[in-house]
Amino acid sequence: MEDFKARCADLIYSEGRLVDLREWDAWLDLFQEDAEYWVPAWNGEFEYTVDPDGEISLIY
């Protein structure tokens, strides 16, 4: 399990570095074709939307 956590952390750090460097093509290469990138909106002050197909999203 620790190896999985380390690999996930490496991916997140790599993604952040590519975004910081504005290496957009390399950042996009991290995603598989069937990946979904979703940034939910808010239903209220402390409640996010949960359905990207039926509710407003910031990015989908």
Image: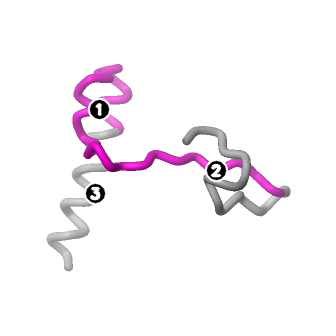
Closer mark to the observer between disc 2 and disc 3: 2
Q: Which residues are magenta?
A: 16-43
Query: Is 5 displayed left or right of 59 in the figure?
Result: left
Task: Identify the residue at the far front of this view.
Answer: 53
Task: Identify the residue at the far left of this view.
Answer: 3
Return the disc, 1 or 2, that comes first in the chain's sequence.
1
Instruction: Identify which amino acid the numbered label 1 is placed on.
Output: Trp
Numbered circle sitting on residue 27: 1
* Residue identified by numbered label 3: 9
Query: Is 59 displayed left or right of 10 in the figure?
Result: right
* Residue identified by numbered label 2: 40
Instruction: Identify which amino acid the numbered label 3 is placed on.
Output: Ala
Residue nearest the observer in this picture, 28 or 15: 28
Determine whether label 2 and label 3 are within 8 Å by CB: no
With respect to residue 37, does 8 lie above or below? below
Residue nearest the observer in this picture, 21 or 34: 34
With respect to residue 45, does 39 lie above or below? above
Judged from the image, the secondary structure of the residue bearing numbered disc 2 is strand
Q: Please tell me which residue is depicted at 72% across the width and 46% down the height of the picture.
A: 56
Q: Marks 2 and 3, how far apart in space?
A: 22 Å
Q: Give coordinates of residue 1: x percent, y percent.
A: 20, 79
Return the disc, 1 or 3, that comes first in the chain's sequence.
3
- Residue 21: in magenta span: yes
Return the disc, 2 or 3, that comes first in the chain's sequence.
3
Q: Marks 1 and 2, how far apart in space?
A: 21 Å
- Mark 2: few, some, or many residues within 10 Å (few <14, many ≥20)? some
Instruction: Identify which amino acid the numbered label 2 is placed on.
Output: Pro
Q: Give coordinates of residue 30: x percent, y percent.
A: 24, 40
Q: Please tell me which residue is depicted at 61% across the width and 53% down the height of the picture.
A: 52
